Image (cartoon, rainbow, N blue to C red):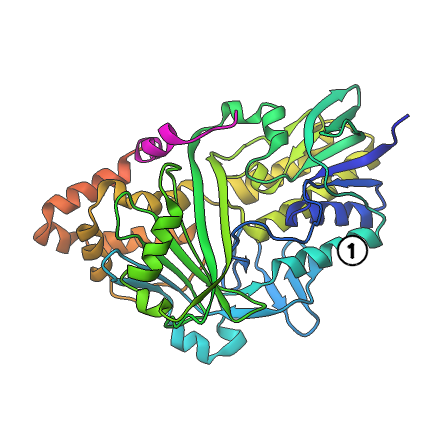
Amino acid sequence: MAKVYDLIVVGAGPAGLMAAKTAGENGLTVALVEMKQSITDINRACTMMLLVLNEYIFGERITFNTRDGRFCFPVNGFSIRYDGPYKNLYGWQFYSPGGACIPFGNYREREAKGDAGRVSVVHDKSSLLRCLLEDCERHGVQLFPGTTIVGIEKKGDQVYVESAGGKHFCGRFVIAADGTNSIIARKLKFNEQRTFYATLIGFGWDLQGSAMEEPMSLKTWVGEEKPTIFFFSIPRASRDEFAVIGGGFDPRIDYEAQVDRFLSQGRFASWFKEARRVRKVGFCENVYSPIREPYRDNTLLVGDAAWCQEIEITGAVLCGWNAAHAVTVALADGKINREGVERYLKWWKRSIVDRHDYTNYLRPFTMPVMLSNEEIDFLFGAMKGPLKSTLHAFTGGEILTAEIQKLIPMIQQQRPRLLEKIVQFGITPLERLLAEGIASGYPNR
């Protein structure tokens, strides 16, 4: 007869490891199932940022205790160990196709303040996962790496999870932390009611020897070519390297070719003239609307599995911690049902879904659908920075919208047709702006 675990966690990223670690600390019997054979390997593109250190996100005000090596979540009341390398980030620069720059924050002023001026840190994700994994093992979590889940079914008060090798795991609760392309979300039919926006594809390189200005920052470029893709650059924590990634919502684009042209022929090619390409990075993920009620059949979806594209490592850790505590309380109360984990569902709605509008994150990346490169150049050039300092994935769009509103009298006078397009852009449903991505993507329902 199969062992019955208190909790089965599917997925050993930050959300899953945090859930397993927390449940183990609470004394639960936990099985942690992960598709990768080596849990700490990073096999896809990732900016590896801790967001954010100068403002609230998901209701939390994160701090980094460099003395003791801990990422701290004081509002929720916990911290996690981190003994790996890190680098401070002091700003975010957003470039138009013609090279006009919108700076979020004054980079030089923040850099001069050192740790007090950082808006985020880049860390080594492998080190972060290792620290969480070691804590899981310390608290009795049973690990099952190299295990791909193919099915899930609730029978009575227990949930059975099936692997590709025919092995079955039995638990009283399941926490699904298997990412944006979640198998569990698909098997339990969560995706059938979600809005599909696009299949997001990205490709890039880790580079050595780049010569970027204000290097300790996140950089975003609106691509010069049509169809438009966006480029991102971020320093790596453990090496003298930078990741440069190009991505977009149309899987028909040759992203490798676009990245190559950006690095060798683009407006900023001089920054990469002496750079050596040392490591390919990429990703492919589907973008859906969030799941408002991430519970079904004694299973909780956490992190990217229930969110829209990127909940960031910050959000993933918060989800794992809160979900594990909710399951612990449910088991202690003998409520092996939705009522037992209602505290997590309330937290999810309050702190994630209702706190930040995911469309504010997606909409800025649809600007090229309605505006020409020349019009984007004009808008970016008209904004006199620096703007409010942020690396916040959701408030960045709000800040840009507020700045454009300040420019309306000038735009009305100089470019009335552009103003009409801006107004239309603001009221057009996201589904229409991303119509090409929806038509060309590959939704896993």
Amino acid type, label 1: Asp
Question: Residue 221 in the image: x percent, y percent?
Answer: 33, 56
Q: Which residue is drawn at 21% across and 41% down?
A: 423
Left or right of 278? Residue 387 is left
Q: Residue at x 33, y 57 (%)?
A: 262
**Measured along the vertical axis of the image, is residue 198 above or below residue 398?**
above
Q: Residue 281 versus residue 162: which sits nearer the camera?
A: 281
Q: What is the secondary structure assignment of the residue under circle 1?
A: helix
Q: Which residue lies furthest to the right in this view?
A: 1
Left or right of 118? Residue 426 is left
Q: Residue 347 versus residue 389: which sits nearer the camera?
A: 389
Q: Residues within 10 Å of mark 1 (few under 14, many from 20)?
A: many
Decide if residue 392 is in sight here: no
Give the image quarter of residue 422: top left
Question: Residue 204 in the image: x percent, y percent?
Answer: 44, 54
Would residue 103 be counted in the magenta stretch?
A: no
Give the image quarter of residue 77: bottom right
Question: Residue 29 in the image: x percent, y percent?
Answer: 85, 40
Q: Which residue has dot 1 on it?
A: 135
Question: Which span is picked out in magenta?
Answer: 430-445
**Measured along the vertical axis of the image, is residue 364 above or below residue 126?**
above
